[in-house]
Amino acid sequence: MSRRDIEPFEHGTPARTAVLLLNLGTPEAPTPAAVRRYLREFLSDPRVVEVPRAVWLPLLHGIIVPLRSPKTAAKYASIWQPEGSPLAVATAALEREMQDELARRGHHVVVRHAMRYGQPATAAVLEELHAQGVTRVLGLPLYPQYSAATTATALDAVARWLGGKRRQPALRWVRAFADHPGYIDALADKVRAHWDAHGRPQRLLMSFHGMPRRTLLSGDPYHCECQKTARLLGEALGLDPTQYVVSFQSRFGAEAWLQPYTEPTLRELARSGVRRVDVVCPGFVADCLETLEEIAMEGKRAFLSSGGSEFHYIACLNSDAGWVQALAGLIETELQGWPTRQAPDPAALQASRERAEALRQAQG
């Protein structure tokens, strides 16, 4: 008997709608063991590393993970918060704020977050929603710019879960929001607030996560969407193209990635006479290792050691009020046509929650 044949269900259970916020993921602890588990899952994804498996997997498990785990764990330890990983903390906070904001706007929906790698796992969260009677899911990857290595693999994970279900929910998917006016306005407001408090820099550097250059040549739209976000943000801030620079960070391996690279760009700006640079990362909505350690720490060292005088990192949107408002507006648009303003029966909802809890306990 397949797992499609074992799905507890009571006819008459009220239909429910869920919004699923999907993020990349994070180790559960800043330790080599936890980082090893995370890197194995993350770097084993063929969407992330597009190298033949027979070549890549022995290299990954035999050399890369053993060598990188202690170093990466030390980097995580340098940014770890009392509540946990910054990415996990920020994503959970965004879930709570979005639940409250959508309720304030009159929408009776369940908001949950899941990670593509690590916990809470995408399949486990979908299973929980399924057990609660959710029949409509709006999937929202928290990647402003579309890439096969991020957005597509998040959808892959959802599709794998759907493939095992007899009673599949309806699914809608937010592909990207690189040029969404609310997102651009939230970014611009974040930068303006920093400038109001600290003054303006000589250059604003917009650093996006990098990808191998061959992904662009293969048709991935990520590079183009990053450039569009940067252009729109520059226009919203009233900057001309000489006042900001676009770069790409987090290069891994020996092959060519999208250029210019962030760290060499920071060094070159300092050597060219730029005394102050501010850095914003419009490809990340939540602060994480790549922003707090790679940019705010390593990037700062690169700029100052190359002759720069003042470096400012402008934090991600995280769960800022303006971003919550913008994201709620995007979600409202995507929910149109679904009856989210009709309140479900409280008794039925409680029964559904009890069944979900019993299922979780049965699964261990």
Image (cartoon, rainbow, N blue to C red):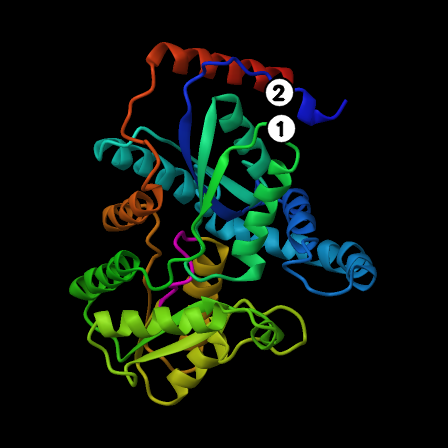
Q: Is residue 27 magenta?
A: no
Report helix, strand or loop for mark 1. loop
Task: Give the image location of residue 30, x and y in percent.
Answer: 57, 45
Q: Nearer the viewer, residue 95 or 82?
A: 95
Q: Residue furthest left?
A: 196
Instruction: Name the residue beneath numbered marker 2.
Output: 7
Query: What quarter of the picture does the N terminus occupy?
Result: top right
Above/below status of 360 relative to 253: above
Instruction: Name the residue beneath numbered marker 1.
Output: 166
Q: Pointer 1: residues within 10 angstroms few (<14), some, or many (20+)?
A: few
Task: Give the image location of residue 173, x and y in percent.
Answer: 46, 48
Q: How far apart are labels 1 and 2 at the CA level?
A: 8 Å
Task: Give the image location of residue 253, x and y in percent.
Answer: 67, 70
Mainly helix, strand or loop, the magenta region?
loop
In the image, taking residue 268 as reference, residue 216 lies left or right, namely: right
Write the residue at 35% across / 72% down: 230
Q: Residue furthest bottom?
A: 272
Q: Is residue 315 something that shows in the picture?
A: yes
Q: Nearer the viewer, mark 1 or mark 2?
A: 1
Q: CB of mark 1 within 8 Å of CB of mark 2?
A: yes
Q: Which residues are magenta?
A: 280-287
Write the residue at 70% across / 53% down: 44
Q: Amino acid at mark 2?
A: Glu
Report helix, strand or loop for mark 2. loop
Task: Give the image location of residue 166, x and y in percent.
Answer: 62, 28
Mark nearer the N terminus (1 vs 2): 2
Query: What quarter of the picture does the C terminus occupy?
Result: top right
How many dots with numbers?
Answer: 2
